[in-house]
Amino acid sequence: MKMKRGLLMVAATASISLSSAALAASGTASFDVSVQVLASCSISASNMSFASITTGTTTNTDATSTLTVNCSSGTPFTIALGNGTNYSAGRRLASGASYINYFLYSDSSRSNQWNSTSGTGTGSDQNFTVYGRIPSGQSILNTGIYADTIIATITY
């Protein structure tokens, strides 16, 4: 009799286990994962420093600056240069109330004044040279340090 009771208990336990497994259910759900990758660009510039000149009538004096652009690969961009802080019918270097006219060009022969330039990002630094010229024929009477500030803007 003892054995029957043990078998009955085992059978009852197995029956409970089976019925619990038979009652288990599951469900699923899915969700999307996404991110929007935005284009980015940065721009930096080196200073343009003309060589020293003396008072009197100028000859052509040239200098350069480098704009460094880094845009996401495939991103189109345009670089524009502002007129400068001393602009009056043209770019001018200022020392107090004295001025020296100058021009900015996009080519080394200094025949194309800089309006804007365009490109496409590579994901690496790209360099653009700005060619400056103080043209000959200006009469400079006052000594001093003449300066201007140009803002380079990148649009993408």
Image: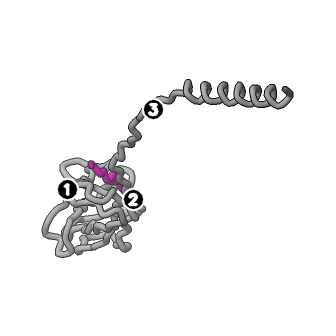
Lateral position of residue 105 relative to residue 140, left or right: left
Q: Amino acid at mark 3?
A: Thr
Question: Percent x, y for residue 138?
Answer: 22, 65
- Rounded to the nearest angstrom, the CA distance separating label 3 from label 2 is 52 Å
Could you say whether the residue bearing mark 2 is in a helix, strand or loop?
strand
Q: Is residue 87 above or below residue 64?
A: above
Question: Percent x, y for residue 148?
Answer: 35, 55
Query: Quadrant location of residue 43?
Result: bottom left
Look at the image and tell me whether residue 91 can be seen: no
- Please name the residue that numbered disc 1 is placed on: 116
Asked whether the beta carbons under mark 3 and mark 1 sit within 8 Å of each other, the answer is: no
Query: Quadrant location of residue 12?
Result: top right
Quick one: 86 or 42, which is closer to the camera? 42
Q: Is residue 35 above or below residue 51?
A: above
Q: Which residues are magenta?
A: 148-156
Q: Residue furthest right?
A: 2
At 50% from the left and 30% from the top, the residue drawn is 26
| Mark 2 neighbour class, 10 Å CA radius: few under 14, some 14 to 19, many 20 or more | few
| Mark 1 neighbour class, 10 Å CA radius: few under 14, some 14 to 19, many 20 or more | some
- Please name the residue that numbered disc 3 is placed on: 28
Could you say whether the residue bearing mark 1 is in a helix, strand or loop?
strand
- Of badges 3 and 2, the one in the foreground is 3
Q: Amino acid at mark 1?
A: Ser
Q: Earlier in the sequence, mark 3 or mark 2?
A: 3
